[in-house]
Image (cartoon, rainbow, N blue to C red):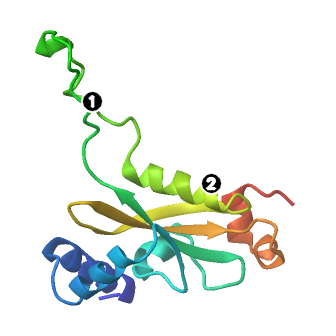
Amino acid sequence: MPMYSQISKTWQQIFHEKGGDMKTRAVELRRQPAAVRVDRPWRLDRARALGYKAKEGVIVVRMRVSRGGMRKQRPTSGRRPKHMGVLKIKSAVSSKQVAERRIQERHPNMKVLGSYPVWEDGMHAWYECILVDPLNPAIRKDYDYRRALGIVS
């Protein structure tokens, strides 16, 4: 079995079982701030599929996003339950898109290549985002990144 497919299979088991070594990592995640720049990705298979290369100008940021519905507070004045506007309120964007947007706001000089889920519990979901600096000379020389970022030359 190829290496990256084996890594992917292992991660799927870890993600669905939510046990083993990942419990200690989950404790670490909860203690960290919302956005953390990490040295290397946890899920190498997904990172490489999105375009990650271990080179200058490419960084990985782990972002925490809160989970749960978009429930609104119940109004105090009297009205029909149908017109209260409390139920069936959904966010128009996914938590993955929220994580990418927040990271883009924190790193305005970088471009987001993509993101993938790392862990989730009852309160939060964590995503790792791959960011590229389009002005870095190492990135400008790389054909794959120039094509992905739309740099024509």
Callout 1 amino acid: Ile
Residue 47 versus residue 112 in the image, above or below: below
Closer to the camera in the image, 122 or 146: 122
Circle 2 is placed at which residue position? 105
The furthest residue to the top: 79
Closer to the camera in the image, 83 or 4: 83
Residue 79, position as x, y percentages in the image: 16, 9
Residue at coordinates 73% horizontally, 68% vertically from top-left? 133
Callout 2 amino acid: Glu
How far is mark 2 from mark 1, CA to CA? 26 Å
Residue at coordinates 29% horizontally, 38% vertically from top-left? 70
Closer to the camera in the image, 85 or 115: 85
Secondary element type, mark 2:
helix
Quadrant of the image containing the C terminus? bottom right
Mark sitting on residue 119: none
Residue 124, by quadrant, is bottom left
Circle 1 is placed at which residue position? 89
Quadrant of the image containing the N terminus? bottom left
First in sequence: mark 2 vs mark 1: 1
Residue 55, position as x, y percentages in the image: 67, 84
Q: Residues within 10 Å of mark 1 (few under 14, many from 20)?
A: few
Residue 20, by quadrant, is bottom left
Residue 141 versus residue 151 in the image, above or below: below
Q: Residues within 10 Å of mark 2 (few under 14, many from 20)?
A: few
Q: Is residue 134 left or right of residue 112?
A: right
Residue at coordinates 71% horizontally, 61% vertically from top-left? 147
Residue 90, position as x, y percentages in the image: 29, 34
Secondary element type, mark 1:
loop
Residue 14, position as x, y percentages in the image: 21, 79
Q: Is residue 20 left or right of residue 115?
A: left
Q: Are marks 2 and 1 in contact (CB under 8 Å)?
A: no
